[in-house]
Image: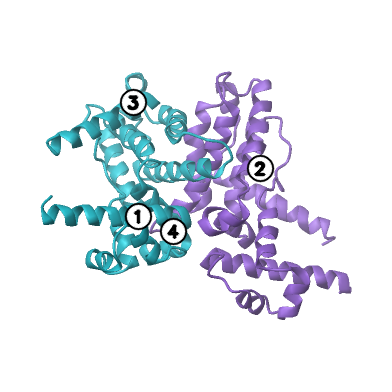
Chain colours: A purple, B cyan
Amino acid sequence: MARQERAVQTRIAILEAAAAAFGERGYDATPVTEVYERAGVTKGALYFHFGSKEDLARAILDQAVTTEGVAPHELRLQELADILLLMAYRLPREPVLNAALRLSVDLPSQQLFGTRWPDWSDLLTRLLAEARERGEVHPYVDEAETARILVGAWTGVRLVTAGLPGDFDLVREVVALLRLIVPSLAVPTVLARLDISAERAATLYAEMTAKEGEDRGE
Amino acid sequence: MARQERAVQTRIAILEAAAAAFGERGYDATPVTEVYERAGVTKGALYFHFGSKEDLARAILDQAVTTEGVAPHELRLQELADILLLMAYRLPREPVLNAALRLSVDLPSQQLFGTRWPDWSDLLTRLLAEARERGEVHPYVDEAETARILVGAWTGVRLVTAGLPGDFDLVREVVALLRLIVPSLAVPTVLARLDISAERAATLYAEMTAKEGEDRGE
């Protein structure tokens, strides 16, 4: 492995260790010691890659808003659903995404770093505006308001189902959320063509990881 | 003022001071000193009423689930909407309710005290089951799942709109949320009779506070 590639791997290992710790204990309660021990690297290696615990949190948040794995679709509403479904599939499996939500929600880290909710909201607002121009959604749909509600509802469904006793699958919960909300947005001919299902989320994830493998030349 | 009444007032003042502090800074970052100074009482008075900071958090959470101000209605779906609308009106105005949500969401306090989401979820599940027995909702509505989604979505809408730049009114946001979701639940004849509006929330609150005044003999 080339030196540069090793450095990239080390950086990823540190970030994932930080994410796992922040996700389990919260930002404030996580000492930096725990991060480098968990990553199996030295204190020096951590501080070579990240100047401080704050930098770790910011680097995690920088990865929070992603549409990776969501292909363009002739229906903008399908793209919107795909983003929310794929994120539901990924979040419980990817410590960095889970930690980004935790950092946004907990008050101490929210007060230090803000959230990426405005970016999520802007992204969904744009998609809904395009969906309206194309006649996919009812003309009375307020895209900024609907985007806010979707970001909030998605986030809360994650928090509450993770906090309830029982083993809830986030994909199934987000499917249920979207099946409650999307019929109020989509015109009937579009609604009939949308795929809002747990299978869709699994397929999108499989395609994304296959493509990542190809990109690495596997 | 009788001694007993004074004691009740002191207890309320301490609880509200704790709630305001937990809501602003989070549970972990709030020292007990801040609570009794904020309440304008002595340390001794605080420990007379509450054995510890943990007790303050538990007393706040004990007030989290309430249907006060929601009158029985011939439509169970209206009762359900009323609960969510009135809570949206009250939460930004009542530090104890705001702090209960904060304690449930932040990881350190959630890990210490749990949440009251199961109680909220049970309450809404019961109402939805009754609504289904009465033919108010479509027969395919899964009441436990829908209740979970409603609790999650409500909570997340609160968190995200409080975290976004701009001054969002929680009542208007919850109205928007319910107007997106309720049409997927209610049969058309019931949907047409429901009042899901910001005015409804304000009226319910006015009636509740008037009734509280009467109960105190004002």
Dot 4 falls on which chain? A
Q: Residues within 10 Å of mark 4 (few under 14, many from 20)?
A: few
Type of the residue with mark 1: Ala
Residues marked 4 and 2 touching at CB (< 8 Å):
no
SS state under label 4 = loop
Q: Position of residue B147 (x, y in %)?
A: 37, 43
According to the picture, the residue beneath numbered tag 1 turns out to be B17
SS state under label 2 = helix
Dot 2 falls on which chain? A
Residue pictured at 31% horizontal, 61% vertical: B56
Q: Nearer the viewer, residue A72 or B87?
A: B87
Q: Are marks 4 and 2 on the same chain?
A: yes
Q: Kindly identify which numbered label has been placed on residue A119.
A: 2
- Distance from the alpha carbon under mark 4 to that under mark 2: 30 Å
According to the picture, the residue beneath numbered tag 4 turns out to be A167
- Distance from the alpha carbon under mark 1 to that under mark 3: 30 Å
Q: Kindly identify which numbered label has been placed on residue B200.
A: 3
Type of the residue with mark 2: Asp
